[in-house]
Image (cartoon, rainbow, N blue to C red):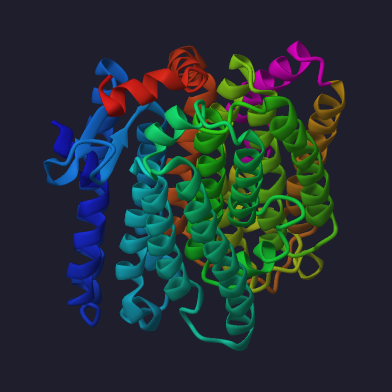
C-alpha cells in the first residue's frame, strides 16, 4: 500500500509525457486528460481514506530507510491537500476546452497542466526539505510554460516579473537549505525536527527559520512580497489563472505550515509573534488592492492575498482551534478561488471586457451566472452556513483564546470588505438596465465545472459536522510533531 503514496505524483507526470505526443490531436489530448485526471482523483481519494483511517504511509524509495533515502510521507495534512488539488484539477480539465483556443491547446497546455499537478502533489508529499525545493522547481517550470501560453506583449512583461521573483526566491531557498544542512547535517524533515532540539545554536536556527519564511512568503504572496502576483495571475487564460490562484500560493503556505509546526517550534514567541503582523498587513493590503480596481480578474487575484493572511493568522496563534481554522480555510479557499477565477473568465467572455465600467445588466442575459457569483461571494466572505464561515469562526475562536484582539478585529473588517469587493462585481456588472448590444453566448460548458466546485465548497460548510472532526484531528497531529517524527524515523 505504501507505493500508493507516489501515485499522485507519477500518474500526472506520465500523463504529461503521453499528452505531449498528441499535442496536435486535440480530441485525443482532451479525452486522455479527462480520463487520467478522474483516475488520479480516485487514487487520491483512496489514499486519503487509507491515511485518515489507519495513519501515515511512508514510502522509502530504493529501500533506503529514512533519513538516508528519498522519503515520501502521506500524512493527514498532505493527503487532504492532494485530494483538494485533484478536485480542482478535474474542474479545470473540463473547463479548459471551452476557454482555450485550439492553438493554445496545441502548444502543450495539457502537458504543462499535468506537470504542474505533479509538482504540486510532490511538494505536499515529500518528506525532505531538498526535494521540497525540487518539486517547487517542477511546478514553477510548468507554470512558466503556462504563463507565456499565447505570447502577447502583456503576458511576456508579467511573466518576466514572475520568473525573476521566483528565481530569486529559489536561489535563496537552496542556499538556506545548505546553511541548515551545515548546522543539523540532514535534509530529512523528521530528522531536522529531531536535531534542532539538540543543537545549541538556537539563534542561528531562528535566523535560518526567518529566511525560510521569507522564501515561502514570496511564493505565497504575503505582505510585503506580493507585488509580483496580482497582475501575473490575470494575464494568462482564466483556467491557468485559476490553477495559479488555487495552487501556487497554497504550496508556499503549506510549506510555512509544515516547517513552522514541525521544525521551528522552539522560538514561538519570536517567530509566530512576527507572523501576526504579517497576517494582519496581508489582510489589509490585499483587500485595499481588491477595492482599488475595476478589473474583475484583478479583484479576484488581490483577494488571494488576504486569504493567505487568514491562514498565517492561524499558524501565528498556534493553538488547536486556530490550526483547525487554517486547515479548514486552506481547503475552502483552494476550491472557491478556483471557482471565482473561472467565473471571472466567464464574465470577461460574455461581456467582452474585464472592466466593470464597461459592463452592466448582465443578469438579464445570464441570470444563472449572476446568482452563482452572488453565492460565491458569500462563500468567500465566510457568511454562514458556508465553508468560509467555519474556517473563520475557528480562527477567531483561536485568536480570542490567546487574547489576540487586534488581529481578530482586522480579520472581521477584512471579511466585510472582501464581501463588498466581490459584490461590487455583482452590483456593477449584473445589476442595472439590460444592455441590448450584448450578444448572447452559450456558457453551459463553462458553468458545469464551476457548479461542481461550488457544490464541494457548500458541502464543506453544510457538512461541517462530518468534516470538522477530520480537520480537528489533523490540527492535533500538527501540534504534536513527535507523531510525524516517529512515523518517519520508526522510533
Image vertical order of residue 144 relative to residue 433, above or below: below
Is 397 colored magenta in this rendering? yes
Query: Where residue 446 sits: x, y (%)?
Result: 45, 58
Q: Classify the position of the C terminus by image quarter.
A: top left
State which quadrant residue 377 falls in: top right
Residue closer to the observer: 94 or 472: 472
Query: Where residue 139 sits: x, y (%)?
Result: 41, 61
Q: Classify the position of the N terminus by image quarter.
A: top left
State which quadrant residue 439 falls in: bottom right
Name which residue lies at 28% across and 40% down. Answer: 72
Q: Which residues are magenta?
A: 375-404
Magenta highlight: main SS:
helix
Image vertical order of residue 430 relative to residue 261, above or below: below
Camera sees residue 300: yes
- Give the side of residue 356 with respect to residue 95, left or right: right
Is 308 colored magenta in this rendering? no
- Give the side of residue 47 with respect to residue 368, left or right: left
Camera sees residue 383: no
Image vertical order of residue 292 relative to residue 379, above or below: below
Residue closer to the observer: 260 or 105: 260
Query: Where residue 86 sits: x, y (%)?
Result: 35, 45
- Give the side of residue 459 with respect to residue 36, left or right: right
Query: Where residue 485 sits: x, y (%)?
Result: 37, 25
Judged from this view, the residue extending furthest toward the front is 200
Residue closer to the observer: 207 or 53: 207
Name which residue lies at 17% across and 45% down. Answer: 61
Residue closer to the observer: 20 or 29: 20
Amino acid at each position: 500500500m505504501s507505493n500508493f503514496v507516489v501515485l499522485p505524483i507519477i500518474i500526472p507526470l506520465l500523463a504529461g509525457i503521453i499528452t505531449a505526443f498528441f499535442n496536435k490531436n486535440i480530441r485525443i489530448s482532451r479525452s486522455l486528460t479527462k480520463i487520467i485526471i478522474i483516475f488520479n482523483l480516485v487514487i487520491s481519494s483512496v489514499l486519503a481514506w487509507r491515511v485518515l483511517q489507519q495513519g501515515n504511509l511512508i514510502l522509502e524509495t530504493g529501500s533506503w530507510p529514512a533519513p538516508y533515502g528519498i522519503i515520501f510521507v502521506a500524512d493527514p495534512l498532505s493527503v487532504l491537500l492532494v485530494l483538494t488539488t485533484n478536485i480542482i484539477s478535474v474542474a479545470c480539465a473540463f473547463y479548459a476546452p471551452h476557454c482555450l483556443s485550439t492553438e493554445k491547446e496545441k502548444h502543450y497546455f495539457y502537458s504543462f497542466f499535468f506537470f504542474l499537478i505533479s509538482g504540486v502533489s510532490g511538494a505536499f508529499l515529500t518528506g525532505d526539505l531538498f526535494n521540497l525545493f525540487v518539486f517547487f522547481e517542477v511546478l514553477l517550470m510548468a507554470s512558466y510554460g503556462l504563463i507565456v501560453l499565447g505570447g502577447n506583449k502583456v503576458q511576456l512583461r508579467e511573466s518576466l516579473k514572475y520568473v525573476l521573483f521566483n528565481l530569486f526566491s529559489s536561489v535563496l531557498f537552496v542556499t538556506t537549505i545548505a546553511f541548515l544542512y551545515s548546522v543539523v547535517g540532514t535534509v530529512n524533515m523528521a530528522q531536522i525536527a529531531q536535531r534542532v532540539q539538540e543543537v545549541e545554536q538556537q539563534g542561528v536556527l531562528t535566523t535560518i527559520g526567518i529566511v525560510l519564511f521569507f522564501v515561502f512568503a514570496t511564493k505565497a504572496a504575503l505582505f510585503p512580497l506580493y507585488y509580483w502576483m496580482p497582475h501575473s495571475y490575470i494575464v494568462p487564460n482564466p483556467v491557468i489563472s485559476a490553477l495559479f490562484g488555487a495552487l501556487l500560493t497554497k504550496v508556499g503556505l503549506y510549506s510555512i505550515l509544515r516547517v513552522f509546526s514541525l521544525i521551528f517550534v522552539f522560538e514561538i514567541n519570536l517567530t509566530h509573534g512576527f507572523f501576526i503582523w504579517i497576517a494582519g498587513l496581508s489582510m489589509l493590503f490585499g483587500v485595499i488592492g481588491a477595492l482599488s480596481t475595476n478589473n474583475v480578474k484583478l479583484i479576484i487575484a488581490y483577494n488571494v492575498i488576504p486569504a493567505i493572511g487568514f491562514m498565517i493568522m492561524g499558524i501565528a496563534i498556534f493553538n488547536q482551534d486556530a490550526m483547525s481554522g487554517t486547515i479548514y480555510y486552506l481547503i475552502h479557499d483552494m476550491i472557491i478561488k478556483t471557482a471565482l477565477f473561472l467565473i471571472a473568465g466567464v464574465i470577461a467572455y460574455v461581456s467582452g471586457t474585464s472592466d466593470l465600467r464597461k459592463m452592466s445588466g448582465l443578469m438579464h442575459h445570464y441570470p444563472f451566472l449572476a446568482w452563482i457569483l452572488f453565492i460565491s461571494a458569500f462563500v468567500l466572505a465566510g457568511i454562514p452556513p458556508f465553508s468560509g464561515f467555519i474556517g473563520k469562526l475557528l480562527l477567531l475562536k483561536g485568536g480570542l483564546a490567546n487574547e489576540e484582539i487586534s488581529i481578530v478585529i482586522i480579520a472581521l473588517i477584512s471579511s466585510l470588505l472582501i464581501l463588498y469587493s466581490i459584490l461590487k462585481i455583482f452590483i456593477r456588472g449584473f445589476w442595472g438596465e439590460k444592455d441590448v448590444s450584448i450578444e448572447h453566448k452559450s456558457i453551459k460548458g463553462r458553468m458545469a465545472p464551476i457548479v461542481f466546485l461550488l457544490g464541494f465548497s457548500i458541502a464543506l460548510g453544510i457538512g461541517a459536522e462530518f468534516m470538522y472532526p477530520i480537520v480537528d484531528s489533523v490540527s492535533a497531529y500538527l501540534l504534536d510533531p513527535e507523531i510525524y517524527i516517529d512515523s518517519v524515523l520508526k522510533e
